[in-house]
C-alpha cells in the first residue's frame, strides 16, 4: 500500500467520523426536542458520501435529497452552519429557512437538496445538461435513494440523459436492507418489481455498477471511474451503492438503533458481545470498518484513531453548544428572497 | 339526540373510513406507508389489521402512477380513498387530478363518474419547511369538477369523510396536521354524516362575522372568547367545504353583523380568502358597514425556523387585532375628499 492511499484513508476516516458524530448530535438534539420537525440521518451510509465526493472535482455540481447531511458535510460544508440550519438558526447555511431536508451550499457546487423524492434526479439531469453546454469537463452527480426510482421522473431523466449523452453520475444509495427492509428479506427493495435496480438504467443502455456502499475505497474507485467516463464525453453512468442505514429518522424510527458509536469496538478497547446488533458492529458499520482497515495495515494507529475520535467529539460538542446559543432569524427577514434580488 | 362520544380528529377520520369500508366493499385506501406502518401521522392506525393489504394498499413512491390507477378504478366502479402524504405533493398528481378525474363526468356527458376521495395533510406548526407545509387547497378549488372540504372539528372530519366517500365526484379533503389531537364530540353511524356544501355557524355573535377555514376556525373561536371579554361578540362561520361554497349561510350571517373578516391559512394571493370575500360582496354588499377584509397566510414559502414559521399563518392574536381594527378604525373611505 502506498502512502497516498494511506493518507487518503485518514482523510476518509476523519470525514466519516465527523458525519457520524454530527448525526448523533442531530438525533440527540431531536430526542431532546431542541428542534421540532423531522430529520433523516446518514448513519451507515458515510462511506458512500465520503468516497464519492472525494472523486468529484471542484467545479462539479451535486444534487441530493432529504438525506443530505452527510453529502453536504462530505463536500466540506461547515458543520456549525449545517447544524444551525437544522435547528432553524439565523447563522444556518440557509439562514433557517430550509432546514434539515434542504441543506445546501451553491459555493460547494450544490444545485439543490430536495425533499420531494425523485425531483433531485430531474435537477441533476438539468445540471448535467448545463455542464455539457459549458464544455469545461464538469459533470453533475445525483445522490438519491432507491425510492427515487419509484418515481416516474427518474426514468424520464435517465432516458434523456442517455439519449443526449449527458455527463451525469446517478448514485443510488440503496439502503433498504435495514429498517423495514431487512424484515422483508433485504435487497433490492420492498417495492421494486425489478429485482436488480441496475436493470432500469441498463434497459436504456446506461452502464450500471453495483458497489458495496460500506467500503469507502470501493465507492471512491467506482465514482472516479464514472467521472472519467463522463469527462470523456461518454454520457451518464449509474451506480448502486448497497448501504445499510441504521440510525433512526424521525418520525418513523426516531432513535439511534445502536446508540452512540464506540470507536473502541474497532480498536479492540471495547468487546463486542453477541447482542442483537453484533453483526452491525462487526461487519456493517462503515466507520468501524474503515478504522479496522487502517489498524490492520498499521497496528500502531490505535492511539491516533482514538485521538481523532476524541477531537471530533470535542469539536461537535463545541458546535452543539454554540448552535444552542445562536439566535433565531429576525422576524423582519421572513420575506427576504421570496423573489430573487438584483440581476441574474 | 344522536348518540355521541368524544374522539380526536384523527380517530374520527379513521372511524369514518372504517365505517364506510364496512358499508361498501368497493371502498379501499391507497397511499404511502398507510398499511402496516399505520401512516406517518398514525392517520390510518388499525385499518390494516381489520381490512388487510388488499384494501389498505401501500403504494410505491409513485404518486402520479398510483393516483392514475385510483382514477381508473373509480371509473370502473370502485371508491378509492387516495392519500397524498403531504399536500405539497399534490403537485405530482396534477394531470390525473385536473385533466382526468375532474373532467371525466363532463366529457363523457355523465356516462362515467369518478367517485374518489383524495386525502392529504397541510399546515404550518410542525417545522417541516417549504416543501412540506403549504396549504394548497385553493389550487384544487380553481378546477371545475372537484369538490374540496377543509374540516375543522372531529365531528366534521368524520361527517365530511363519510359524505365524500359516498359522493359520485372526486372530493379532496385537506387535514391540518395540528388538528389531529383535537378532541370533540362525534356522532355514530348515519347520524354523523355532514353534507358537502353546507356551512355552519360555529359560534353566534352580533358585531362581526369571521369566516374561517380549517384550523383557522379553532383560532377564531379562541379569539372570540378573548373579544367577548371586551364586550365584542363575533360570529364564527365555518364553510366546511370550499367547493361547493355555502355562500348563503355566510351572507346571512354578514347581513346580521354587517361586517366580515375572512381568515384563511393559505397564501393570500389569489386564494380562498379572496373568493369568499368577493362572494360576500356580491351577496351582502348593501348590508356592509365596512369593506370585507382578509387575514391570510403570508405570500412566502413556509420557513423552518421557530421564529419565522409562526409568522406565516394567522393566529388568535392576529385575529383579535384585525377584528378590533375592523370594528373601530376601518370604515368606508371618506368619499367627500373625492368630490371634484
Ligand atoms: C414525492 C414524495 N413522496 C413521498 C415523500 C415522503 N418520503 C420522505 S422520505 C421517503 C422514503 C424515500 O426512500 P428512499 O428514496 O429509498 O430514500 P431513503 O429515505 O430510504 O434514504 C418518503 C416516501 C416525499 N418526500 N416525496
Image (cartoon, helix red, strand yellow):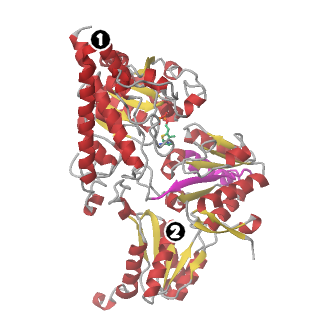
**Place of residue B170 in the rendered image (x, y in percent of width and height, measured from the top left):** 64, 54
| Depth check, front residue: A155 or B7 | B7
Can you give x and y, in whole percent of width and height, for residue B122 in the image? 50, 56
The residue sitting at 23% across, 52% down in the picture is A341
- Label 2: few (<14), some or many (≥20) within 10 Å? many
| For residue A3, side relative to residue A247 (left or right) | left
Any mark on residue B83, and which? none
Based on the picture, tell me whether residue A153 belongs to the magenta stretch: no
Mark 1 surroundings: few (<14), some (14-19) or many (≥20) residues within 10 A: few
Asked if residue A101 shows in the view, the reply is no
Q: Chain of mark 2?
A: B
Q: Chain of mark 1?
A: A
Q: In the rendered image, is residue A289 in sight?
A: yes
- Which residue was labeled with disc 1? A297
**Farthest residue in the bottom direction?**
B336
* A67 with respect to B202 (left or right): left
Q: Which element is circle 1 on?
A: helix
Callout count: 2
Give the residue displayed 29% in from the left and 54% down from the top. A339
Between B40 and B266, the one nearer to me in the picture: B40
Q: Residue furthest top?
A: A1
Check if residue B98 falls in the magenta segment. Answer: yes
**Residue appearing at x 52%, y 71% in the figure:** B217
**Quadrant of res B190:** bottom right
Tag 2 secondary structure: loop
Mark 1 vs mark 2, CA separation in Å: 66 Å
> Are tags 1 and 2 found on a single chain?
no
Magenta residue span: B95-123
Residue B96 drawn at (x, y percent): 58, 45
Residue B213's label in the rendered image is 2
Amino acid at each position: 500500500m502506498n502512502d497516498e492511499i494511506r493518507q487518503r484513508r485518514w482523510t476518509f476516516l476523519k470525514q466519516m467520523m465527523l458525519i457520524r458524530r454530527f448525526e448523533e448530535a442531530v438525533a440527540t438534539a431531536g430526542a431532546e426536542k431542541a428542534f421540532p420537525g423531522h430529520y433523516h440521518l446518514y448513519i451507515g451510509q458515510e462511506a458512500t458520501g465520503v468516497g464519492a465526493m472525494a472523486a468529484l472535482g471542484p467545479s462539479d455540481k451535486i444534487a441530493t435529497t432529504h438525506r443530505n447531511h452527510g453529502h453536504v458535510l462530505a463536500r466540506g460544508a461547515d458543520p456549525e452552519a449545517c447544524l444551525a440550519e437544522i435547528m432553524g438558526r439565523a447563522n444556518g447555511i440557509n439562514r433557517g429557512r430550509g432546514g434539515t431536508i434542504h441543506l445546501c451550499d451553491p459555493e460547494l457546487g450544490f444545485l439543490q437538496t430536495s425533499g420531494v423524492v425523485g425531483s433531485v434526479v430531474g435537477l441533476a439531469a438539468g445540471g448535467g445538461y448545463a455542464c455539457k453546454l459549458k464544455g469545461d469537463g464538469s459533470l453533475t452527480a445525483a445522490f438519491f435513494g432507491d425510492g427515487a426510482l419509484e418515481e416516474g421522473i427518474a426514468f424520464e431523466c435517465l432516458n434523456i440523459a442517455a439519449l443526449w449523452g449527458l455527463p451525469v453520475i446517478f448514485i443510488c444509495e440503496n439502503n433498504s436492507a435495514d429498517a423495514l427492509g431487512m424484515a422483508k428479506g433485504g435487497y433490492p427493495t420492498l417495492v421494486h418489481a425489478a429485482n436488480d435496480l441496475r436493470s432500469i438504467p441498463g434497459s436504456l443502455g446506461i452502464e450500471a455498477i453495483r458497489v458495496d456502499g460500506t467500503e469507502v475505497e470501493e465507492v471512491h474507485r467506482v465514482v472516479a471511474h464514472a467521472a472519467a467516463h463522463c469527462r470523456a464525453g461518454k454520457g451518464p453512468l449509474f451506480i448502486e451503492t448497497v448501504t445499510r442505514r441504521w440510525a433512526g429518522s424521525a418520525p418513523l424510527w426516531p432513535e439511534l438503533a445502536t446508540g452512540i458509536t464506540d470507536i473502541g469496538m474497532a480498536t479492540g478497547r471495547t468487546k463486542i458481545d453477541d447482542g442483537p446488533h453484533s453483526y452491525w458492529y462487526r461487519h456493517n458499520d462503515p466507520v468501524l470498518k474503515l478504522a479496522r482497515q487502517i489498524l490492520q495495515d498499521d497496528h500502531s494507529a490505535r492511539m491516533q484513531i482514538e485521538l481523532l475520535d476524541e477531537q471530533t467529539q470535542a469539536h461537535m460538542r463545541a458546535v452543539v453548544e454554540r448552535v444552542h446559543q445562536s439566535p433565531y432569524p429576525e422576524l423582519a427577514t421572513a420575506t427576504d428572497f421570496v423573489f430573487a434580488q438584483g440581476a441574474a | 339526540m344522536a348518540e355521541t362520544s368524544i374522539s380526536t380528529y384523527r380517530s374520527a377520520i379513521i372511524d369514518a373510513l372504517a365505517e364506510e369500508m364496512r358499508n361498501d366493499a368497493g371502498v379501499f385506501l391507497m397511499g404511502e406507508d398507510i398499511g402496516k406502518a399505520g401512516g406517518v401521522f398514525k392517520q390510518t392506525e388499525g385499518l390494516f389489521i381489520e381490512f388487510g393489504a388488499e384494501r389498505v394498499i401501500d403504494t410505491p413512491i409513485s404518486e402520479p402512477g398510483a393516483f392514475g390507477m385510483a382514477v381508473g378504478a373509480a371509473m370502473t366502479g370502485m371508491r378509492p380513498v387516495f392519500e397524498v402524504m403531504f399536500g405539497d405533493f399534490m403537485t405530482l398528481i396534477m394531470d390525473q387530478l385536473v385533466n382526468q378525474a375532474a373532467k371525466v363526468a363532463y366529457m363523457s356527458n355523465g356516462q362515467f363518474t369518478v367517485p374518489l376521495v383524495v386525502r392529504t395533510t397541510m399546515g404550518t406548526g410542525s417545522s417541516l419547511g417549504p416543501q412540506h407545509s403549504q396549504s394548497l387547497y385553493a389550487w384544487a378549488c380553481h378546477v371545475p369538477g372537484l369538490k374540496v372540504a377543509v374540516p375543522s372539528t372531529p365531528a366534521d372530519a368524520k361527517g365530511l369523510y363519510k359524505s365524500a366517500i359516498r359522493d359520485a365526484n372526486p372530493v379532496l379533503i385537506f387535514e391540518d396536521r395540528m388538528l389531529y389531537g383535537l378532541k370533540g364530540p362525534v356522532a355514530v353511524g348515519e347520524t354523523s354524516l355532514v353534507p358537502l356544501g353546507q356551512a355552519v355557524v360555529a359560534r353566534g355573535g352580533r358585531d362581526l362575522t369571521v369566516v374561517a377555514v380549517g384550523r383557522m376556525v379553532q383560532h377564531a373561536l379562541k379569539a372570540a372568547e378573548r373579544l367577548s371579554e371586551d364586550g365584542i361578540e363575533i360570529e364564527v362561520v365555518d364553510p366546511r367545504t370550499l367547493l361547493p361554497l355555502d355562500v348563503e349561510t355566510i351572507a346571512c350571517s354578514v347581513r346580521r353583523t354587517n361586517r366580515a373578516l375572512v381568515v384563511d391559512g393559505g397564501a393570500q394571493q389569489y386564494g380562498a380568502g379572496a373568493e369568499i370575500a368577493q362572494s360576500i360582496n356580491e351577496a351582502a354588499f348593501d348590508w356592509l358597514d365596512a369593506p370585507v377584509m382578509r387575514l391570510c397566510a403570508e405570500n412566502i414559502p413556509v420557513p423552518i425556523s421557530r421564529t419565522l414559521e409562526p409568522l406565516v399563518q394567522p393566529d388568535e392574536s392576529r385575529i383579535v387585532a384585525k377584528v378590533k381594527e375592523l370594528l373601530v378604525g376601518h370604515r368606508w373611505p371618506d368619499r367627500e375628499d373625492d368630490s371634484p
